[in-house]
């Protein structure tokens, strides 16, 4: 019997699982261009948290677009959409990602007495 623990899952196996389960990123068609939002699952955990927080915040939607999209894509969206449309677009993208990632839930955790 060996005293050395064997891993249940390896990094290489995890990478293969990730590629097989990769969802599609949120995309938006405008004119003849398709704009792809970042895939939070491919970002570092810290960057993904920042991205999702930006998506869910309504404080600075133009800053969110300029931070997370390519400059050309951001310029196109911000030149074509009014503020209501921009808010709706970001809300749809956020819902897409929440469906993929799940949400934090609401209410108190269950307890036993």
Image (spheres, rainbow, N blue to C red):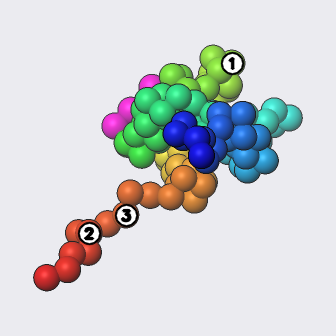
Give the answer, above or below, for where 89 lies relative to 75.
below
Percent position (x, y) of residue 77? 63, 31
Q: Residues within 10 Å of mark 1 (few under 14, many from 20)?
A: few
What residue sits 52% from the left and 39% below the top?
A: 3
The residue labelled by disc 2 is: 109
Residues rendered magenta in the picture: 59-63
The residue labelled by disc 1 is: 72
Q: Nearer the viewer, residue 1 or 55?
A: 1
Q: Secondary structure at mark 1?
A: helix
Number of residue marks: 3
Q: Secondary structure at mark 2?
A: loop
Give the answer, above or below, for where 53 lies relative to 62.
below
Whether residue 78 is visible, yes or no, is no
Q: Main secondary structure of the magenta part?
A: helix
Quadrant in the picture for the C terminus: bottom left
The residue labelled by disc 3 is: 105
Instruction: Tell me if residue 60 is in the magenta stretch.
Output: yes
Q: Secondary structure at mark 3?
A: loop
Q: Residues within 10 Å of mark 2 (few under 14, many from 20)?
A: few
Looking at the image, residue 27 sits to the left or right of residue 94; the answer is right
| Residue at the farthest bottom position | 113
């Amino acid at each position: 019997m060996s005293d050395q623990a064997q891993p249940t899952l390896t990094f290489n196996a995890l990478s293969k699982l990730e590629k097989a389960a990769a969802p599609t990123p949120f995309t938006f068609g405008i004119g003849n261009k398709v704009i792809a939002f970042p895939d939070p699952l491919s970002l570092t955990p810290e960057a993904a948290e920042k991205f999702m927080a930006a998506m869910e915040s309504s404080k600075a939607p133009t800053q969110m677009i300029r931070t997370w999209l390519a400059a050309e894509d951001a310029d196109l969206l911000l030149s074509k959409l009014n503020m209501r449309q921009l808010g709706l677009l970001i809300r749809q993208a956020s819902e897409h990602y929440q469906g993929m990632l799940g949400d934090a839930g609401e209410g108190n955790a269950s307890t036993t007495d």
